[in-house]
Image (tube, helix red, strand yellow):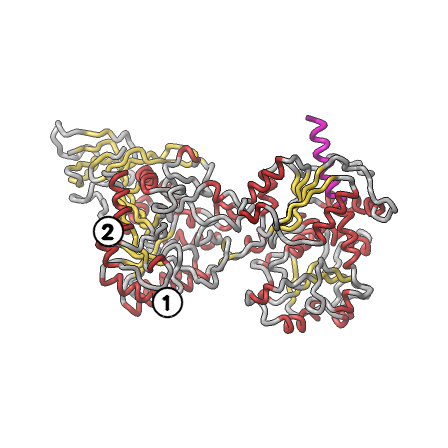
Amino acid sequence: MLLLENVVHLEAAADLLIDDGRVVTMTPAGHCEYSPDFPRFDGGGLTLLPALIDCHTHLREPGFEYKEDISTGLSAAAHGGFGAIMCMANTRPVNDAAAITVFMLERARKSWPHGPDLYPIAAATKELAGVSLAPLAELKEAGCVAVSNDGRPLESAEILRRVMEYAADLGMIFIDHCEDPWLAKNWRMNEGRVSGELGVKGQPWCGEAIQAARDIMIAEYLDLPAHIAHVSSAATVDIIAWGKARGVKITAETCPHYLLLDETWLEGYNTQAKVSPPLRGPEDREALRKAVREGVIDILATDHAPHAAYEKDVSLDDAPCGFSGLDLALPLTFRLVDECAISEKDLHRLWAVKPGEIFGIPVNDFSPGDPADFILYDPGKEWIAAKENFYSKSWNTPFLGQTIRGRVVHHWHRGYQLF
Amino acid sequence: MNDTHSAWPHKDLLDVTQLNGEQTRRILDLANGFREINTRPVKKVPTLKGKTVMLFFAENSTRTKTSFDVAAKRLSADTFSLATAGSSINKGESLKDTGLTLEAMNPDIIVIRHQASGAARYLAEKLKCSIINAGDGWHAHPTQALLDCFTLDQFWRGDFKNRELLILGDIAHSRVARSNIHLLHSLGVKLRVCAPRTLLPAGIDDWPVEVYPDLEQAADGADAIMALRLQLERQQAGLLPDLGEYAKRYCLSERHLKLAKPGAKVLHPGPMNRGLEISDEIADGAASLVLDQVAAGVSVRMAILYLLAGRNEDKNAVA
């Protein structure tokens, strides 16, 4: 039993009563009935949020522990406000066998026994090679919650169809990184004005939208669900809206960086801004903001992709794609709230309620019986996005050096205070 | 050399976009002065004696590298070459480490050619010595643009305003085109480009050029035509059907030159694919400035080496 008092929830003072890892009740401040001998926690006027769920991370273990490992990834998750994260299968070896999933979960339990929870994502195909299906039933039994070929987008529409079908029997959703293998070859950034000026190979937005259309049509044909990962372009938003209007069971995510940045961040050959899919134009950014506000894009995800500093300290040609995202995701999303692009209520929906719903992960909506997964957030706390302030092992981000406003101060998981 | 201006303000030469009109003119005037040295029986002055110029060419080059080498030696600088073949780059050394290693030998200037766009800028941000970009990927080739400009200046006598220059060929993958378009546009030249759409860069609508798919229309009334080298791998990449068809549509020949203004000149950065982007008779004809460009290259590069090395001199004097 714990009474959390003096906290702000959706701009109103509130009290939260929890017991045995679950929410008992949340009331307006001073309206909670409790016995005076309950332990109490003074929230000090901080913002109360549900713990977030991130359905798209790369934790790099096994195989690339110099970039991140499961322990540091979960540490970044915990301090970033995430109570549950899903991790992609592009490790070495690839997560295409139960033994790898079991190993991942074991590492998570040992390093963070009280959470955050780790939910591995199964490789859709063996070694992510896109040729034959991975043993998905075995992977599901070991603890995988979804299926994806992220890291090596599926080229064959036939394989994609069979993955969707086979995974559906097991109740696993297929997550697709949409990238046409031919239109999107050897690219460094979005194809457009900036790539033309810099003289680097670009990826056209249709390289993403075409694959999203393919997925949606196959999902419609099979009447099965599919989830589009990290949407970056306005055209893909339109395709998703079209699919949803037809009743296709399609869901989609985008990431804070696509809502805040655009291709001009690549000027000066800024390798910290190189990401897959690439940052697009300002009009794409605006379309994505509208889409998350209106629900065409269902959820947010970090696409946390840590890389060692030296790997990004090369030419734009040679730099790997991706940003370290878990430490920054929540304050960056609050930038959108501050800019009135979304509301704080939208933030709860995009980062907790909906991802929980789509992937079947327990989520706290502060209703009685919900898991007591929540954070206290200081929206005014300023800190610098720098190596020494990141819990992730890597600090590769275009926001490097910026003053960040807002940080998670306390985190409870199933009623247990992580910090 | 009679250059009485203030200290040169740029540590590096990465692209022509960093030059204002006055600085471009200063380079051209200096190069004009150095041109005379290149015609003397003894083609050497002691100006940069004791200076070290490193030539770091990670990509193949004959004329640019030789041109820098000749320019530096005529100014009495010591030059050292590092080519990819036989270097640590083949053993997987990063650009950063190669750069730091070269700098540890205390060069005054590193001349770099690299296949990655932005490579020269990357080194310039890392190293204290001056960096001259001798071509980075598809991005920039400032000394080529300056020598082209110098060559045209000899014929146009400083009058660039409203001259019509056609750049013919693979614009998308050409650092020569990018730098020339920036520089000549800034001098008031009206630019045309002619290429199949597969060889045009994204966003060209925003560039200060007029695009022509047809060479006859493009050549009509031009004051000068610059043909670009067609890299043969563009055909393998599926950007062109075959080289024969390319030559039929885009090989610069007498009939195109007849459509241009009387006395129009032809440029080519070399090496030429005769019969592919430029016909034999044009390449060897009276309108061709190809060898003038090569000669100009030495003078222009002497001017640039002089300005950058001299800049370091001033800084040291103050310190």
Residue B198 sits in quarter: bottom right
* Residue at mark 2: chain: A
Is B308 part of what is drawn in magenta? Answer: yes
Tell me if I can see residue B104 in this picture. yes
A121 to the left or right of A39:
right
Is B100 part of what is drawn in magenta? Answer: no
Find disc 1 in the rendering and name its residue: A157
Find numbered disc 2 in the image and state the secondary structure of the residue it sits on: loop
Find disc 2 in the rendering and name its residue: A143
| Residue furthest out toward the front | B86
Residue at the image point whose x is 17% and y is 37% from the top:
A18
Tell me if I can see residue A293 in this picture. no
Label 1 crowding class (10 Å Cα cut-off): few <14, some 14-19, many 20+? few
Amino acid carrying mark 2 in the image: Gly
A36 to the left or right of B210:
left
Tell me which numbered mark, 1 or 2, is placed earlier along the sequence.
2
Q: Position of residue A239 (x, y in %)?
A: 38, 63
In this picture, is B73 found above or below B155?
above
Q: Position of residue A101 (x, y in %)?
A: 27, 50
Find numbered disc 1 in the image and state the secondary structure of the residue it sits on: helix
In this picture, is A29 found above or below B21?
above
| Along the viewing direction, whichever of A177 and A341 lies nearer the viewer | A177
What stretch of residues is rendered in magenta? B302-319
| Along the viewing direction, whichever of A127 and B242 lies nearer the viewer | A127
Between the residue at mark 1 and the residue at mark 2, the CA separation in whole angstroms equals: 27 Å
